[in-house]
Amino acid sequence: MTAKDLSLGLIIIFAWGFNFVVIRWGLDAMTPMMLGGMRFLVLALVGCFFFARPKTPLKWCLLYALSLNFGQFAWLFCAMTFGMPAGLASLVLQSQAIFTLIFSVLLLKETVRPYQILAVTIASGGLAIIGAAGEDTSMTVLGFILTLAAASSWALGNITTKAIIQKGYQADLSLIVWSAGIASVPFFITSYFVDGPDLMWSNLKDINWSTVAVLGYLALFATLAGYGLWSQLMSRYSAGTVAPLSLGVPVVGLTSAALVLNESISHQQWVGILVVLLGLMLNTFGGRLRHAQPKIRT
């Protein structure tokens, strides 16, 4: 990877890692459902001028929007509202790799390799260590469970993406942009019944420049620019070269949350974090190590 492309990768890592701090700021100004609805509405309104409507059938657009967009971020925003620290959220959300592997076996009948089973076991053990910290830290059990629900929704979105590609359609930025408009609808409907119309109107009426900046970051920088740059790198290099960059996201998330939000992490949680990262690294690099094993001549 060239120095220029590596710098683009670092920009993506920062954009997605610092994203969790920005979400925390957004949740201080808006309810979870309103923040989610406005994020995807802004993305759809801006993006539709630059990207043509995808040829993907409506059924698959709906599944994509409801799992990857609505499901993931509805659960994540609620998790961070009910006691999940931003830094830990950036790490626990990466458990989507575990859920994706499980769902791919159950729904797509894909084959699992031994190193993947080991990776899932290790990462699951790390999540158990983090979850066991419970109420002894700033993290709540409810927030932890809701973050796992967000990760499982992300994984279902990954399975939907695979299915879309297998059917010969493109899962590119046009799909992301146009599905965002679909995703904003269930956010606003849920907000109507959970928050009530008065609180919805109050959220809209009280929008200031800082809230606009938050929405701009989440919709345009973290999503549109982030996934756009990611797609460029994936088109130039193999998935095995680009995918490991995502391991830097929780590192940035944990660091920025500690520096900006003064979040603290217990010793037990640090142990769990390291174990999870070990499992994720094995899942990412395990295939390379298997192919790199020297052949013994007889």
Image (cartoon, rainbow, N blue to C red):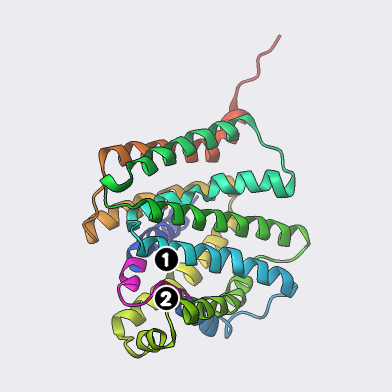
Which residue is identified by label 2?
Answer: 35
Q: SS of the residue at dot 2?
A: helix
Please name the predominant secondary structure of the magenta segment in the image. Answer: helix
Rendering quarter of residue 146: bottom left
> Quick check: is 16 in the magenta stretch?
no
Residue 35 appears at what percent x and percent y? Answer: 42, 75
Give the quadrant of the C terminus: top right
Which label sits on residue 77? Answer: 1
Q: Is residue 231 left or right of residue 226?
A: right
Q: Which residue occupies the foreground of this view, 192 or 281? A: 192
* Residue 52 visible within the image: yes
**Earlier-in-chain disc, 2 versus 1:** 2
Q: Are marks 2 and 1 in contact (CB under 8 Å)?
A: yes
Q: Which residue occupies the foreground of this view, 61 or 194? A: 194
Residue 199 appears at what percent x and percent y? Answer: 38, 84
Residue 174 appears at what percent x and percent y? Answer: 62, 74
Q: Is residue 263 left or right of residue 219?
A: left
* Residue 172 visible within the image: no
Q: Is residue 22 left or right of residue 148?
A: left
Q: SS of the residue at dot 1?
A: helix
> Quick check: is 33 in the magenta stretch?
yes
- Residue at image location 78% in from the left, 61% down from the top: 167
In space, the residues marked 2 and 1 are separated at their CA atoms by 8 Å
Residue 50 vs 172, above or below: the answer is: below
Q: Indicate the amino acid at tag 2.
A: Leu
Which label sits on residue 197? Answer: none
Label 1 crowd bin: few (<14), some (14–19), many (20+), radius 10 Å: many
Magenta extent: 23-36
- Residue at image location 40% in from the left, 63% down from the top: 15
